[in-house]
Amino acid sequence: MVEEKVLVTALQTEADKEAAFRELVSQYKERLYWQIRNMVLDHDDADDVLQNTFIKIFRNINSFKGESKLHTWMYRIAANESITFLNNKAKRNNTSIEAVKDNALRNLESDVYFEGDAIQLQFQKAIALLPERQRLIFTMKYFEDHTFEQLSQILDTSVGGLKSSYHIAVKKITQFIKTNNETL
Amino acid sequence: MKKNRNKTGFKIPDNYFADFEAQLYSKIDEINFPPRTGFKVPENYFERLDDSVFNKITASEKQHKVISLFPTKYLGYAAAFAACLVIGFSIFNTANEQETLDALQLATIDKYIDEGNLNFDLYDITTFIDDDNIINTNLEEQQFSEAVLKNYLLENVDEKTLIDEQ
């Protein structure tokens, strides 16, 4: 794995840019993909957002000043792209972001790229009900094992604030699962 | 009361014990959550991804050859015709100009916004806002019930962040 500083220098040098970018894509594609997929749920949507994320990274790499870590910057772009995508999709379909999520959840039940059981489906439903930012915090922490310190840099929020958002999210999910189990 | 004779020298983060229980119960709740998302990806998706990203970048950067719709020899006639039209309009259509222009602008602006083309930066907008309206607003006269306000604050305000950032 090429060291981040070396990679950034190569990315900002015209002659090495392409090779360095290929290295970057191969190092981060899976991590960024799962971050995005957890937000948009559908594979094709996640593919679109991931490609746009990398294109944005490629186009803006020269303005990357190194004030944060490269991967922090990329995760932030992926997070913003996911939320922008959901908003734009809602706007295109002339509906709310909640309706877009409802629709994505309904599709999940018949999605060939979802192999979760009933419990996982219910879990996804509970996560989808969270407000966007809480959802981002919860999925990045729970599924992708970011530490609160890393998340604090990516999302530009205090560690304390993140922790409390995360716990609120866990509480809401637990409540949702409990209520739905009772009604089953 | 007995004094602590020996100090360990250890310190704990602010609010550690206050937050401890919330964190512990949250961890206990998490035990019941499924460990995996259940999502999968098409076969070889990640292997193919590098090339498709690159194809997109090169495709968008490739300069396309521009073929002129009108050969240049007709350009003079077109310019003359356009000039006649402009002059004609300005002579015969002066009376309603202001009105039509206003209506057109509003409709166009509405459409422009509806289509989601308005992409202002939040900071740009805030520079145009002064706080006169906020100061002059009498909140007590507004129709916010306590329950609505409470719900809003519970959902949207992260009290922990506020405390931390004080």
Image (cartoon, grey):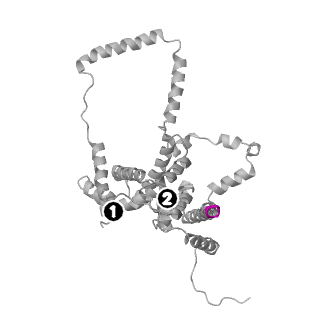
Give the percent coordinates (x, y) of residue A100. 52, 48
The amino acid marked with disc number 2 is Leu
Magenta residue span = A180-184
Q: Residue at x 27, y 54 (%)?
A: A17
- Label 1 or label 2, whichever lies nearer to me, is 1
**Where A159 sits versus B133, above or below?**
below
- The residue that disc 2 covers is A155
Q: Residue A181 is drawn in which quadrant?
A: bottom right
Residue B16 image point, x, y percent: 60, 74
Q: Quadrant of residue B130?
A: top right
- Outermost residue on the front side: it is A184
Q: Which mark is residue A27?
A: 1
Residue for point 50% across, 62% down: A139
Q: Are marks 1 and 2 in contact (CB under 8 Å)?
A: no
Question: Label 2 crowding class (10 Å Cα cut-off): few <14, some 14-19, many 20+?
Answer: some
Tell me the subunit letter for badge 2: A
Q: Are marks 1 and 2 on the same chain?
A: yes
As displayed, is residue B115 above or below residue A158?
A: above
